[in-house]
C-alpha cells in the first residue's frame, strides 16, 4: 500500500492479507454463528428494510406530471401471454433504499481496501475487487440493536459517541462482541431534511466499533448530513467502510425492530443479510431479517 | 369469481376471503415459525440462489461482440467524487435468476387470485393486487429439502410424483407439514437445454402439496420444458401458483443446500426469504437462506 | 383479413398488398420528393420537436425528492478515463416527447395492418411487422403547415374538421397533395391539462386526409383528451394510424415552425424525419426538420 | 484557461468567447446554409447511420443464451390495452451506433472546452456545459463526401493525411470550405476487428480540417484502433473534438451515401443532423440525412 494513512485512525488494511475482500466479515467465526443460533427461539422476526414504492416508467397521458423520486423504476413488460412480468431499474446506493455498501464503494487516495489501485478494482465493466461478490451468498451473524431513540429521536446535530453505546448496552442488558452486527437506531429517516442538521455517528463511536470488533453495521441514519466535522473524514463511510473495511447497511428502517425488541424484552437476535446474489456490484439493496 | 375452474384440480380461491393477497402464506402460523426456530441450532447455513454475473452496459471499443445473456445489466455510474456507485436493470422473471413469483404473475381466464379482474390487478403503472407487497417484509418458515437427485440428476422427461416425495421423506427421515416451505431438488439447472426434455413436477405432485399444506415451494427445475403434458395446465405455475395461490421460488440452485443437509444428516431447517423490499412487482430476485 | 372493418370508415388495408409495412408512405413518390426539393431555397429551417430535459437516475443525498416526469432518464457513466459518457432510458411513446408511431403501435380487433395477427407482429422480443424498421433510414417528403392557431389556440373541446383545413389552405395559399406530410397546429401542448377538454382532430378531418393522400401527419395536439367522441374510434390513432396505416408524429412543438412560416410568408417546405436508426420498435423519438 | 495546451496543435479555445458551447458549429453561417440549399435539387437522399437491431430485455425460457452486443436494449411494455409500446435503454457512445459526440465528451487536463472545469460541466445529474443542448434543435449545413475507399477499403494501419483529402477533392471535383460537414469514408466498419490495425485519421488530416474550417465531421472509421501514434493525442477525439471543439459523428455507415454520390456523379449535398431533442447529454444517436 503506497498511501500512508493517518496513524491515529483505526485501520484494518493488511490485517487479513493483501488479497482479502471480506474485511470485518472475517470476524464472524463459527462460534459467533453458534451464539447467533442460540438467539432463535420463537420464530418471531422483523425486517430492517424500508419499503420502496417504485415509479412506473410508462405513463398514460393522464399520469401525474411530478413524482416522488424513488430508487426503483418499474417497467411492466408485454409478455404476449396471460403472464404478468416486469423489470426494474435500481439505483443501488439511493438514500431512500436500504442497501449494503460493498468495500469498493469507498476509496482512500486512489486505493480500495486493502491497497488495490481503484482504477483496477472499479472499472466501466464492473468491480473486480471488493464487490458484492464477497457476500453474495449471504451473511449470518448475531445482531444487537442499540436503540438510542427509545425516548424519541436524537436531537438535531447530535454526535453519537461510545458513551451512548455503552449506556444503551447497560440499559438494555446486552454486550456487543467481536463478530456481531451492530444495529443503531437514531430515530431519524435516511433522507436528509433540507435546513436541518441530522444527528450522526462520531469518529469516537467508530473507534469503539473497531475495538469491539463489529463485523457489519446497520443504522437508520449513520453519517450526519451535513457532516458533524466537515473537515474530517466521514466516520462511517470514510473510517468504518474505507479504513476498517466494515460493510455498511445504509438507510435501514428500525422502528419495527425496536418495537419487537421492546415487546420481547430482548435486544439480541440472529441477523440474516441476503441481498440478490449478484456479483461485481458496488452495493445492492437488501432486506436484513432479525430472528428471535 | 365469474370463472368456473376445473373442479378436479385443487384450488384455494375463496379460502381466505375475497381480498386475500397472501395465499398459502396464510398457512405459516406462529406454531410453524416456532418449529422453524427449533431447527436453528448451529448457525450453519446455505444460500438457495444461483450467482448472477451482470452484463456491463457501457462497452469499450474492444469489448467482446457477443455476451452471455444475464438477468442483470450493470451500469457503473459517474459520481464525480472518489465514490463508486452503480445501477442495475433487472429482469425479474429471468430463467437464470433465482426469483420469487408473486400471485399476480399468473392469471386464470382473465382473473388474478382470488378473482380480481387481471386488468385491475396488473396495470401499466404497476400491480395493485397480488404483488410482491404481500411478502415484501420477508417470509420466515420451516423448510424441508426433498432431494430427489441424491443419486444423480433425474432422468430427462421424468415426471415427479407424490410417490417420489414420500419415498424421499422416508429416506431422509422427515415429514412435510402444513406451513412448510418445500424445497425440491431434481438435479437440473433452471435454463432449458435445447433438444432435451427436462424432468418436472407433475400435477399429482402438486395435489400432494395441496393436501400437505405447502406454504411456498422452491426448486432448481420446477415445471418441465417442454411441458410434461402440453395440453394441460403447467403444474407449478398453472395449478400451484394460479389456483392454489402458492408462491414459487423459480430457478433455485440447490447443490450447496443438498451437500450441507447430507453433511449434517438433517433435511429440515429454518428458511428466510427476504427479497429487496419493493412493493408492487410481479416478482423479484431473492436469495433464500436455509439456517441449521 | 378476418376482421370486417366498418365500411364507412376509410381504410388502406390490402391497398399495397398483404406484406406491406409502409402504409401511406407508399404515396411518397419521386415526383413528391422532387417537389419537396424545390422548396429548399434558403437553408433556413425549424425543428418540430419539443426539447426534453432528462431526469438523472443517480441522486445525491440532497437531491430534490420530487421531480417533473420526463420521457428520458439519464445515467452518467463511469468511464474510468477523462471521457464523459452516458446512457438514456427512453419511453418511446411519452406524451412529453415528440415521437413517431410505427404502424404496429395500433391494432384492430387483434390484427396489425394489413391483417397480421397482433401476437405474431408484436412479441416480447420485439416487433416483427410494422415496426420502425419501415422508416429507419428516414423519411423525406414535402410538408405543409396548416396553422389553425394563427389567431391563438383553438378553443377547448374544439373538433377540427376538413373545413378548417380548407380555410387554412386558402388563407395560407397552399394546397395539400398526395404524398405530403401534413403538419397541423392547434396551439395546445401535447400534455393533457387536468380538468380541461383539449381540442382535437375529428373523423371528418381524417377522412379528408385519406382523400388528399396524406403520407404522414404531425401535430402538437392530435386526438383530443378527453376524446371528442368517447364511443367511437380515436380519429388519428384508431382511423389514421390503425386503418389508413398513416404514421403519426405525436406531441410535436410547432411554435418555431409557425413563426418561421409567417416570417417567410411560406407554409410549404421539405420535411426530413430521421429518428435513430433502430429497428423493431413500436415508436421512436424524432426531431423532424422543416427546410425552406 | 489554466492549462497551457501544446502550441503546435490547432485549437479553438477562446476563439468564440468563454461561454461558447457551439465550437466549430459557429462556422455554419447563413451563406453556408444557402449554399447547402442549392444542393437540394432532386429529392434523393441517403442515411449515414448504421441500422441497429436492439436486444430484447425479457427472454422466454428458450431464448438464446448468448447475444450480439447491441447499443440498444428494448423492453416491450405492457400497456393494458390493444396498443403496443416499448422503452429502450441506449448506450449513447456505443461503437455499433452512429452517434454525435457533444463537446463535453472530451476534456483536456480536467477542463472542457473552452476552459470550464470538467467537474462543473459534467456532473452525476447531467451535463451543464458543452452538452447535446447545443445542437438539440438540429444542424443543417452543406456536406461533402471524400470517398477514400472508392477503390476498396483503405489498407490496415493506413494513416489518412491531408494529401488524401486533396486528391479526393480533385478526383471528385469538389472543394471543402468553411462551415462544411466533412464526411470521410475509409471503407471500414466502426467496430474494431481483433488482431487487426484499422486505418485512421492522422493529426495532419485534422490540421487540414482546422485550416479549411470544418464545422462537423462524420466518418465510418475515424480514430484508428489501435492508435496510429500511441504516445500522442487521438487525432479526431483529442485534437478535433477536444481542442478544436469540432463535434464528431462516430461510427457512420457510408456505403449507401457513396453509392448514391457515384450514381449522381455528385459529392456535395445538404446534410441534416437531427438527433432526438434531448438536452444535457454527452452524446446521442443520430441519423444524418444527405439530401441531393
Image (spheres, coloured by chain):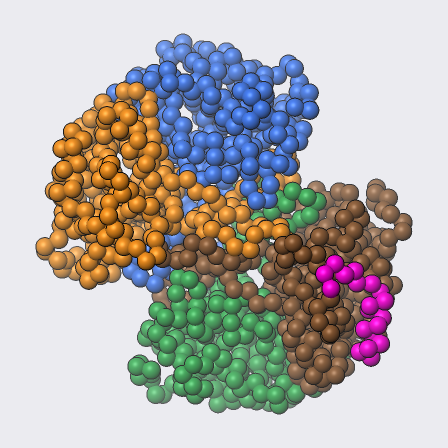
Chain colours: A brown, B green, C orange, D blue
Residue at x 48% of width, y 64% of height: B93
Residue sitting nearer the eye, D127 or B211: D127
- State how many labels appear: 0
Residue C79 rendering spot, x and y as whole percentages? 61, 40
Question: Which residue is drawn at the image coordinates 53% and 25% (left, top)?
Answer: D20
The answer to whether residue D62 is left or right of residue B288 is left
| Residue D73 visible | no
Confirm whether the magenta stretch covers residue A214: no
Q: Position of residue D141 (x, y in %)?
A: 38, 22
Report whether C251 appears left or right of B42.
Answer: left
**Over which residues does the magenta segment extend?**
A155-173
Q: Is residue B58 left or right of residue B110?
A: right
* Front residue of this view, candidates A50 and A167: A167
Residue A264 is situated, as x and y percent measured from the top left of the image, at 71, 84
Quadrant (top left/top right/bottom left/bottom right) for the C terminus of chain D: top left
In the foreground, C99 or B269: C99
Q: Note whether B202 is above or below D97 in the view shown.
A: below
- Using the rendered image of the protein, determine whether residue C235 is visible from the camera's viewpoint: yes
Look at the picture and state if A95 lies above or below B20. Answer: above
Amino acid at each position: 500500500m503506497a498511501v500512508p494513512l493517518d496513524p491515529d485512525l483505526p485501520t484494518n488494511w493488511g490485517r487479513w492479507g493483501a488479497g482479502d475482500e471480506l474485511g470485518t466479515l472475517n470476524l464472524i467465526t463459527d462460534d459467533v454463528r453458534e451464539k447467533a443460533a442460540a438467539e432463535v427461539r420463537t420464530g418471531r422476526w422483523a425486517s430492517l428494510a424500508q419499503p420502496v414504492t417504485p415509479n412506473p416508467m410508462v405513463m398514460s397521458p393522464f399520469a401525474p406530471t411530478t413524482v416522488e423520486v424513488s430508487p426503483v423504476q418499474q417497467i411492466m413488460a408485454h409478455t404476449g401471454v396471460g403472464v404478468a412480468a416486469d423489470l426494474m431499474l435500481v439505483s443501488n446506493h439511493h438514500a431512500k433504499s436500504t442497501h449494503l455498501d460493498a468495500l469498493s464503494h469507498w476509496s482512500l487516495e486512489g486505493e480500495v481496501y486493502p491497497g488495490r489501485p481503484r482504477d483496477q478494482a472499479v472499472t466501466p465493466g464492473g468491480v473486480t475487487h471488493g464487490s458484492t461478490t464477497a457476500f453474495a451468498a449471504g451473511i449470518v451473524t448475531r445482531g444487537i440493536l442499540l436503540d438510542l431513540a427509545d425516548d424519541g429521536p436524537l436531537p438535531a446535530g447530535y454526535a453519537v459517541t461510545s458513551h451512548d453505546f455503552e449506556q444503551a448496552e447497560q440499559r438494555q442488558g446486552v454486550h456487543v462482541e467481536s463478530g456481531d452486527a451492530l444495529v443503531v437506531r437514531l430515530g431519524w429517516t435516511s433522507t436528509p431534511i433540507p435546513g436541518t442538521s441530522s444527528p450522526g455517528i462520531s469518529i469516537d463511536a467508530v473507534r469503539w466499533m473497531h475495538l469491539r470488533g463489529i463485523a457489519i453495521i446497520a443504522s437508520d441514519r449513520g453519517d450526519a448530513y451535513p457532516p458533524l466535522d466537515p473537515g474530517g473524514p466521514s466516520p462511517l463511510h470514510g473510517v468504518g467502510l474505507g479504513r476498517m473495511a466494515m460493510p455498511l447497511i445504509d438507510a435501514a428502517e428500525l422502528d419495527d425492530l425496536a418495537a419487537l425488541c421492546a415487546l420481547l424484552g430482548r435486544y439480541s437476535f440472529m441477523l440474516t443479510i441476503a441481498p440478490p446474489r449478484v456479483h461485481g456490484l458496488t452495493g445492492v439493496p437488501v432486506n436484513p431479517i432479525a430472528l428471535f
